[in-house]
Amino acid sequence: MTAGALGSTETTAQVHPARFTTALLDAARSKGATLRLGVVEGVTVHDGAARGVQVSGETLAADAVVLALGPWTSRVGRGLDLPTVRGLKGYSVTLAAGDLPAHACFMDYRTADGRALEPEIIPRPDGEVYVCGMADLQLLPDSAEGVEVSDAACAVLARAAGQVSAGLAGAAIIRRQACYRPVTDDGLPLIGRVPGAAGAYVATGHGPWGMLNAPATGLALAELITGGAAKVVDLRAFDPARRA
């Protein structure tokens, strides 16, 4: 076994995805944004320009439309000239571990039947430990409600964490989750204007790094939409007009 340090408390930080997302939504609402819940069915395009989105049978008019539906982007963007976005399924477990050092661990792991995994073990300040890093080739369902969690896959992740730390060996699993990460054929995100549809933009394909890259992606798109060009990030490598 080999080990090395990736950072320290001075150079790294941790984001709780659910809390971060909630905070962003609350901030947007405080500035006048409205959250609409529904099934997004497609983008309305007339005369080469995006005019709105179809949501649960209703068309919502808009002068700018951003497709940021993760692995479901290609399904909603049918008819638009975009590279394919696929879903790669992954699992995670949250363990109740109590007081542990604040050391995240990224490891190579082999199961008893020889499968290679790369679990990530991330202690949280509240005593929980988040463990992820197991892929599954199961096909993308029609919606997030159709995502199934495999208890067996989650148990493998919990066992891997227990091999690293005695404090995790008997830790109770308090949450089992599964999700589909959006991936592209060339491994790069799609960020920018949708070719052939003025007023349509896309932001997806970040793989497992969506939460990390979401703030810069959002800011860059806001600059692009309101000012005509992104300043915070050079988006040329992520241009949706490229082909893998």
Image (cartoon, rainbow, N blue to C red):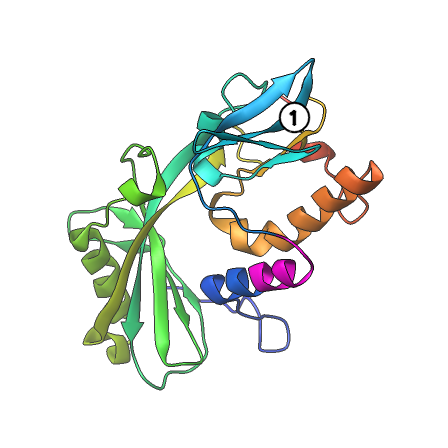
The magenta span reads 24-33
Residue 108 is left or right of residue 223, and the answer is left
Q: Nearer the viewer, residue 7 or 97?
A: 97
Q: Is residue 138 left or right of residue 201?
A: left
Q: Which of 125 and 225 lies nearest the eye of the viewer?
A: 225
* Residue 204, x across and y down, in percent: 55, 38
The verdict on residue 27 being magenta is yes
Q: Residue at x 49, y 67 (%)?
A: 19
Residue 240: which quarter of the image?
Answer: top right
Q: Main secondary structure of the magenta part?
A: helix
Task: Give the residue displayed 20% in from the left and 50% down from the top.
Answer: 150
Magenta span includes 87: no
Of 107 and 25, which appears nearest the observer?
A: 25
Where's the N terminus, which quadrant? bottom left
In the rendered image, the quadrant that contains the C terminus is top right
User: Residue 138, position in %: x, y?
Assistant: 27, 35
